[in-house]
């Protein structure tokens, strides 16, 4: 959802339509080409300050935003806030007040609580980009996944896309679900009942599977999700060994999908848990390309949000 | 103003089945008649201008911050909010800091209520010490000190054997036990009703079944022990079906609901709106309709405000971390009228029914009763505005809702304790 009052924010994919999503992807496409040719326009964000405010560790996402900002010429500051010091929300809003005083332009936020970036966006003058909030959304991940898919198929409609694993706790799954359905594709969600809420089944063009073999049949794209070890402690799955046995993507299961189906993963991967090593490294895997597109998408998001800001 | 005569009023007294144009005469704080000819010659005349005059409302479930969290709501500020809502008797929960688990604290709370001069305050006693769910409180001594019933507030006892003992003990004291029915392990960590919305928002969920499971357990224990059990703020169709069945079997079971559960659904928490984060969480439409039906068929005995004050720091947090609860004193009458029940039935749920359940000498306009009165215009519209409500706490889930039914004046023992701003100039 793009919220726009004085500032434009990217808080989630839900609520965005095709006309809003496509320009992000188009611009990201051009930034991907420029990045490869090492001719990125360093004047786009010159004089602007981008703060990466991470309440959770995430080297990959933070670095991706950092590179994106620097390629566009922004001054990038990384703030990592230990979760233990944020046991009271006043800290979050105090942080907002501090950031306002520092007059930053773009604020990239990751937080363990769903809705935290939305709350911050009400209090800061900077444009807020949700870099992952709890189990809610991770919009730039969905955009980079979409860009990766579009580059291979030339379109985002009329595709069958399987999202496999811990759907319940995944912000990546939620954002991807909204984006892919909005763009006209069909989504299969595959996972054990403890990690796959049946409520998703009520959505149009979404089908649920508890069997990888069934769910992967004829899929154009297979998105695997990271499984956190804590899910075992919480009694949601019995062991990594069992998980891989029933829901891991291996070469045999890959054959159920369409020939040449894309294999994706938001990283970091647990090899031998979500997917077999030889699948992760196979020609069908576009995991490295996802990382590359991540930078391009984040460049596009930072650029467009600043352009969308109304003069205040 | 020892002697007052109310004229030009529609008198509604559910306790006595009255709904008629009548006068009402008050002498020394007591109701002494219903005709102008009963009035002493020096009686002060209040012209109701066609408004409804009913018993002061009796609210059987209120959290106040005192003692321990007066920044949320003190007894004084809560009393001001109560009378602005037409409430003259309120029953306060004991899960404060410290908990109301000693006779001295029960006496203190009652005393603090008297000091406000606005309302009658009736504390519940804690069911277990410190409302911690372990050791039984001195229920007998607490009752002697004035505890109106026993509850651990918003906490649920998970240990069924211990609950059986508590119910058995309360039975011998003929004490009312008020329970927050929510299976704690299912509800642990949750903040929104399980379903499509919570899934999409990525919020930890509480299945609606958590309520019915606890109701089912405690109904069995009530049957085993013969205790008087009251379930608070029932919000699901399934729990209501269980209670309906238990009543048909003749168990001494009662329940209440709170206005959000027949007015709103989970949709109100969209965009992570923490003012609508309540406990139990707002449910789905089928549950809301079931609550309305249960109000109409008598399965639900009482409507209580479930007033739960929170300050900005409690609510300006990410949804899962924000404090659950909404204010409800000022909006109790107006939101109740939205249920669409006949007026006398709505008022019964707010006056005589809770008074009878709690054994209070209140909620009636009988001759000799204390003149606790609420005068309201059932047709006047007003819009709820958070930040502009009487009292300290402003966390209303009804922010922006337009209500039909406005409290004009409230009287406690014949003394006017609240006057609507629109009447403050040039009233009769």
Image (spheres, rainbow, N blue to C red):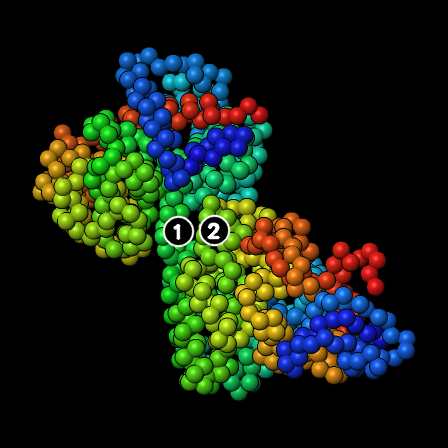
Residue under circle 1? B197
> Within the image, what quadrant is residue A279 found in?
top left
Look at the image and tell me in which quarter the N terminus of chain A lies. top left
The circle drawn on residue B95 is none
Chain label for disc 1: B
- Secondary structure at badge 1 equals helix
Crowding at dot 2, Cα within 10 Å, few <14 / some 14-19 / many 20+, comes out as: many
Q: Nearer the viewer, residue B267 or A12?
A: B267
Query: Is the residue B8 above or below the residue A90 in the image?
Result: below
Instruction: From the viewer's side, name the closer residue of B139 and B316.
Output: B316
**Which residue is label 2 attached to?**
B269
Inspect this view and state whether residue A270 appears: no
Q: Is residue B339 left or right of residue B376?
A: left
Quadrant assignment, res B239: bottom left
Q: CA distance from mark 2 to mark 1?
A: 9 Å
Q: Residue at horizontal 35%, vertical 15%?
A: A40
Quadrant position of the C terminus of chain A in the picture: top right
Q: In screen coordinates, is A40 left or right of B349?
A: left
Considering only vertical position in the picture, is B160 above or below A170? Answer: below
Image spot of residue A197 (x, y percent): 30, 53
Q: Is residue B343 above or below residue A304?
A: below
Q: Chain of mark 2?
A: B
Residue B35 left/right relative to A188: right
Instruction: Give yes or no for contact between labels 2 and 1 (Cβ–Cβ under 8 Å).
Output: yes
Secondary structure under the numbered disc 2 in the rendered image: helix
């Amino acid at each position: 959802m793009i919220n726009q009052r004085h500032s434009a924010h990217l808080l989630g994919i839900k609520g965005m339509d095709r006309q809003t999503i496509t320009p992000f992807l188009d611009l990201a496409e051009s930034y991907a080409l420029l990045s490869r040719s090492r001719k990125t326009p360093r004047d786009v964000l010159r004089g602007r300050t981008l703060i990466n405010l991470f309440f959770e560790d995430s080297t990959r996402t933070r670095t991706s935003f950092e590179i994106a900002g620097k390629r566009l010429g922004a001054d990038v500051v990384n703030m990592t806030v230990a979760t233990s010091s944020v046991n009271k929300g006043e800290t979050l809003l105090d942080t907002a007040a501090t950031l306002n005083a520092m007059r930053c332009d773009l604020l990239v936020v990751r937080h363990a609580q769903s809705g935290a970036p939305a709350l911050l966006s009400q209090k800061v003058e900077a444009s807020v980009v949700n870099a992952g909030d709890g189990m809610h959304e991770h919009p730039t991940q969905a955009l980079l996944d979409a860009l990766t898919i579009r580059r291979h198929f030339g379109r985002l409609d009329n595709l069958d896309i399987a999202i496999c694993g811990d759907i319940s706790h995944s912000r990546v799954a939620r954002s991807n679900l909204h984006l892919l359905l909005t763009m006209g594709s069909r989504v299969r969600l595959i996972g054990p009942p403890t990690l796959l809420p049946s409520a998703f089944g009520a959505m149009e063009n979404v089908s649920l599977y508890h069997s990888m073999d069934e769910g992967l049949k004829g899929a154009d794209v297979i998105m695997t999700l990271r499984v956190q070890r804590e899910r075992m402690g919480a009694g949601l799955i019995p062991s990594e060994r069992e998980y891989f046995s029933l829901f891991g993507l291996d070469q045999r299961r890959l054959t159920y999908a369409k020939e040449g189906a894309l294999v994706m993963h938001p990283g970091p991967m647990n090899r031998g848990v979500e997917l077999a090593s030889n699948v992760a490294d196979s020609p069908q895997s576009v995991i490295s390309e996802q990382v590359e597109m991540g930078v391009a998408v984040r460049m596009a998001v930072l650029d467009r949000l600043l352009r969308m800001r109304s003069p205040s | 103003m020892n002697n007052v005569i109310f004229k030009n009023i529609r008198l509604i007294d559910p306790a006595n089945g009255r709904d008629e144009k009548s006068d009402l005469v008050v002498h020394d704080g007591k109701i002494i008649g219903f005709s102008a000819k009963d009035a002493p010659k020096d009686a002060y005349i209040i012209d109701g201008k066609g408004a409804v005059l009913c018993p002061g409302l009796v609210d059987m479930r209120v959290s106040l911050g005192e003692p321990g969290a007066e920044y949320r709501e003190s007894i004084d500020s809560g009393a001001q909010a109560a009378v602005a809502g037409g409430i003259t008797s309120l029953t306060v929960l004991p899960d404060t800091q410290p908990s109301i688990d000693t006779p001295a604290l029960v006496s203190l709370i009652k005393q603090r209520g008297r000091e406000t001069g606005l309302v009658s305050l009736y504390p519940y006693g804690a069911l277990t010490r410190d409302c911690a769910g372990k050791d039984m409180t001195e229920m007998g001594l607490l009752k002697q000190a004035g505890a109106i019933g026993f509850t651990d507030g918003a906490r649920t006892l998970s240990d069924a054997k211990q609950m059986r003992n508590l119910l058995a003990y309360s039975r011998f004291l003929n004490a009312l036990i008020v329970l927050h029915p929510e299976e704690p392990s299912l509800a642990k960590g949750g903040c929104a009703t399980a379903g499509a919305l919570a899934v999409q928002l990525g919020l930890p969920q509480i299945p609606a079944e958590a309520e019915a499971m606890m109701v089912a357990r405690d109904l069995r224990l009530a049957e085993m022990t013969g205790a008087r059990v009251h379930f608070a703020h029932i919000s699901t169709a399934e729990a209501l079906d269980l209670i309906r069945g238990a009543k048909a079997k003749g168990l001494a079971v009662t329940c209440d609901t709170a206005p959000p559960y027949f007015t709103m659904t989970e949709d109100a928490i969209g965009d992570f709106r923490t003012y609508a984060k309540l406990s139990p969480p707002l449910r789905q439409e089928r549950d809301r309709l079931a609550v309305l039906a249960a109000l109409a068929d008598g399965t639900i005995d009482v409507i209580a405000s479930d007033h739960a004050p929170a300050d900005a720091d409690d609510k300006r947090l990410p949804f899962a971390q924000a404090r659950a609860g909404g204010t409800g004193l000022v909006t109790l009458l107006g939101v109740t009228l939205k249920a669409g029940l006949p007026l006398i039935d709505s008022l019964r749920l707010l006056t005589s029914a809770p008074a009878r359940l709690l054994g209070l000498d209140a909620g009636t306009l009988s001759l000799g009763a204390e003149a606790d009165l609420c005068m309201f215009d059932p047709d006047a519209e007003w819009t709820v505005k958070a930040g502009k409500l009487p009292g300290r706490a402003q966390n209303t889930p009804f922010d922006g809702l337009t209500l039909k039914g406005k409290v004009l004046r409230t009287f406690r023992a014949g003394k006017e304790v609240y006057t609507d701003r629109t009447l403050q100039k040039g009233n009769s």
